Image (cartoon, rainbow, N blue to C red):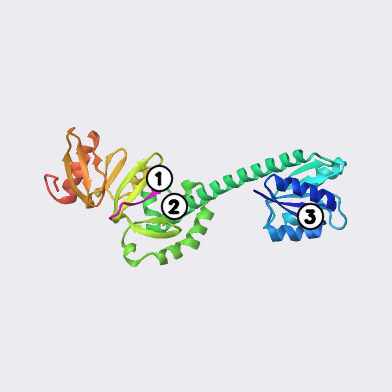
Amino acid sequence: MAKILIIDDDARLCQVLGEFLGDNGHEVTIALDGARGMNAARKNSPDLILCDLEMPGMTGQEVVVMMRQDDRLAETPVIYLSGCTDPERIRQSINVGGDDFIGKPAPYPVILDAVEARLRRQEQAQQRQRRRLKQTVEVVTNLVFDLDVDGGAAAEKSGKTPLAAGLSAEIVEQLRSTFGPALAASRPAADKSGPALLIKEGGRQQFLKISEVKAFLAFGEYSKVYWGGKGENVMFRKALKQWQQELPAGQFVRVHRNAIVNLAFLDRVETDAAQKQCVHLRGFGQVLQVSQRAKATLNRCLKEFTGNPKGKI
């Protein structure tokens, strides 16, 4: 159901068309002149407006000009419903911000089709906007994190910089000065001793030290980061290859194309019934298989990390 505002000085048309749209599942509000239409639009925030072009006092064109100057109504679709036949006047009315024009008289089913088509287009546009907003938040969050943690040293070490996100140096510097101090102040003192991840959970944000991460598992171009004793995890839009370049060498080992493990949480390495080498981490419910090509790297890192020449836990 959509909220529709009809602005027209023809009371009979408003009544009959309003009932028709209401019978087809929409909530309708009526205003009999432009001034009352603007008040109703500001009060009710309609999803779409049907507006006459020629009205005494404030014309439909003037209503739309005022709407487009109001942040609350700037994106609200407007369909003119008018008996005007002057092509130049119609063109001007569209140019100031109208979305469509239906000439009077028009069958009500035709009006309904135009209304629902415009509503679908508006919903599609809002979905695209939400996706872009989500992507922007992810880019900015990751960028701010890179700026905050070691001044972006991890990104520089991997050969990547925040500019890879496609943002200009001026914007990067503005983000650094705007968000950097606030993020640094919000981090617990203990976390400032080493690299950390910015974790978002249920609308909250927290910093998680890299040393507390148990494993990174691949999910296409995404990856899940696991920590804690209850399998806590969060999804990042970041491939394992990039994690591998940024994580402390020697402590985090890629044991398979789909998994990186933290040797600090290693419980044991054993061979299963199929003669496959497997890794068991403390407090981690999954058994991770070691690929053939990763065996040598794992054994070498075990020797270095544990100080045991046999590389055993």
Say which residue label 3 marks.
Answer: 63
Q: How many marks?
A: 3
Which numbered disc flags the more N-terminal residue, 2 or 1?
A: 2
Q: Earlier in the sequence, mark 2 or mark 3?
A: 3
Check disc 2 and report its element: helix, strand or loop: helix
Query: Residue 238's mark?
Result: 1
Q: Position of residue 95 (x, y in %)?
A: 77, 46
Q: Tell me the magenta residue range.
A: 229-238
| N-term mark: 1 or 3 | 3
For badge 2, the amino acid type reads Asn
* Kind of residue at disc 3: Val
Residue at image position (43%, 57%) is 202
| Residue 142 numbered mark, or none | 2
At a point 16% along the width and 51% down the height, the residue shown is 306
For the residues bearing labels 2 and 1, Cβ distance under 8 angstroms = yes
Give yes or no for residue 72 being in the magenta stretch: no
